[in-house]
Image (cartoon, rainbow, N blue to C red):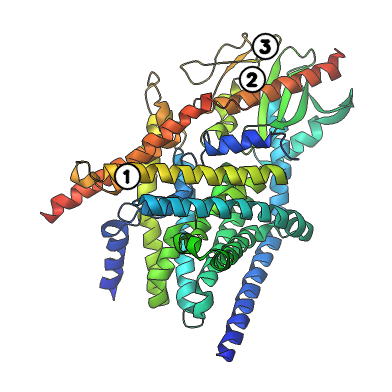
Amino acid sequence: MGKKYKEVFLKNTWYENPVFVLVLGICSTLAVTNNLKNTLIMTIGVMLVTGFSNLTVSLLKNLIPSKVRMMTQVLIISFYVIIVDIILRAYLPDVSKALGPYVGLIITNCIIMGRAEAFAQSNDPIISFWDGITSGLGYMIVLVAIAFFRELLGFGTIFGYRVMPENFVNWTIMIMPPSAFFMLAIFIWIVKGFKKEGAK
Amino acid sequence: MKEKKLYTIIFTFVVSFVFVLILSYINFLTYDKIVENQKFSKISAVLNSMGIEYKDEKDALEIFNSTVKEIELGGLKFYVSTVNGEKVYAYVFSGNGLWGTINGVICVNENVDRIIGIDIISHNETPGLGGRIEENWFKNQFKNEKIKGEIKLVNTQELGDKDKDNSSVDAITGATLTSKFFIQIVNNSLAEIRKALRGE
Amino acid sequence: MSPNINPLVLFFASIFTSNILLSNFLGMCSFISISKNLKSSNGLGMAVAMVMTVTTALNWIVEKYIIIPFQIEYLRYIIYIIVIAAVVQILEMLIDRISPNLYISLGIFLPLITVNCAILGVALFMQLRNYTLLQSVFFGLGSGLGWWLAIVLLGAIRMKVDKAPVPAPLKGVGITLITIGIMAMAFMGFAGMINVQ
């Protein structure tokens, strides 16, 4: 039993990481990756939503009529996203303001829908929950890494604290949208390179 | 087949009903908190623009109620307080950003020749680009800035224009348009304030 | 209060300077997977542009006459996505009846659109920025066309790039992302052309 959990964990965070292997779900979060704090909160939101919607889909899988399967899944996902949104608005108003519409866009994050279809639909609730959480974790690792470099080079700060020397010239391009594409490409390049080495 | 159709419809209804019920309950629970947050964000913006410090939400409310007065002058609504023996006037402005309305507070001294401070209540600019008007380095540029004619936009290589007498502030890299719009809003509000306070 | 922005300016800004895909990263999933083929890129782009315009206008009406009067702002996301799903369904049926030829080239993409972030994104931006109906329509249309333009351009570039020799780990997705990055930089250059106001 424990072996299966470990397997799912490794698969979702490394071997079949949703971001760098399948390039799924980067839509909603890539936009906020020039700020580490926002990225972290967004990805935690994605992680929780993926986990819980997987759990719910798995619990209801035998009850859902096939005709409205997609619709029900979207409904379940929106349900959790709205909860995340309400919680942010009530307890972290600043973050909620900074993220703006991107919280709502978690609904259309392909990873969540993908996991619900591919895993939760045919597995037990608990392992589905675990699958969702680890997929979210794999997603988080990549985006936080991107955000780390973008914020470090673009602003010279980490979590808003200045870490670069005073005379460091900020790389403006890192703040702008195109750098997110470049960073992700470099990330994929490195990871795939590593995997090739391992395979030899 | 007919039964299946009926089941599909009932299922969809029941699921939607349950989810909406839970959501409205959560919404109801956090409603007061969210309203309070909104109220607080305006109060804190007024206090920030005046440069009055506060510890927490409760503290802010107390300071606001005891030291800040609401008055109407020349058709405009002002929040008036005395800071360091100087009478300051805070004015809530709103205007067009690049993408939507920017709401904020600008505070000036009695002669309208110095800006005491600026704070943003809400905006819809892109997070990480135009959204950086919310960041402290940008807002602090306005602090104690001398008003000679209109406030101008400059491009410095550092983060923020440190000269307090040149009536200029540094534009946000990568968000020149938002900066331009913001300066325009500031200048418009300054003109209105001048008209109201000095009768020009 | 609605911002006082000329709808035409909004239209061009959402195609070029603030392309929903290249500056807000919305609709990336289908963007990367479909752009392998120029022809399907074109089909999907057209479908997105169409759905986006219709749903943005519809969601504006729903927002104004259902969500606000009934004070159900907290259900906004669900309602928007249901509207989008419904529009996609209806459009699919309509196209099937009216023009079977178009259905063959467009039909398969329509189901993909419900979960396209760009569509929901545009609706949410429209609501958050308090646009008027006219501004929303232009914003929706502009964003849709911008998306279409971006995916067709990428589709065309990828046809060449896929044959080019690139480092093995970078092949496929990696080089595509770099291409998109360069495209995004090029689009940023439009900022000088359209000086809003």
Q: Chain of mark 2?
A: B
Residue hosting label 2? B143
Which of C46 and A54 lies nearest the eye of the viewer?
C46
> Is residue C19 at least partly visible in the picture?
yes
> Is residue A43 at least partly visible in the picture?
no
Above or below, comparing residue B150 to residue A67 in the picture: above
Res B93 quadrant in image: top right
* Same chain, labels 3 and 2: yes
Marks 1,2: beta carbons within 8 A: no
Q: Could you tell me residue B89's position as x and y percent? A: 78, 23
Q: Give the structural element (helix, strand or loop) at label 2.
A: loop
Q: Give the numbered dot on residue C158.
A: 1
Q: Chain of mark 1?
A: C
Marks 3,2: beta carbons within 8 A: no
Q: Give the structural element (helix, strand or loop) at label 1.
A: helix
Between the C-alphas of marks 3 and 2, the distance is 9 Å
Q: Give the numbered dot on residue C181.
A: none
Q: Disc 3 marks which amino acid? A: Lys
Frontmost of labels 1 and 2 is 1
Tell me which residue sits at (76%, 38%) in the image: B62
Frontmost of labels 1 and 3 is 1
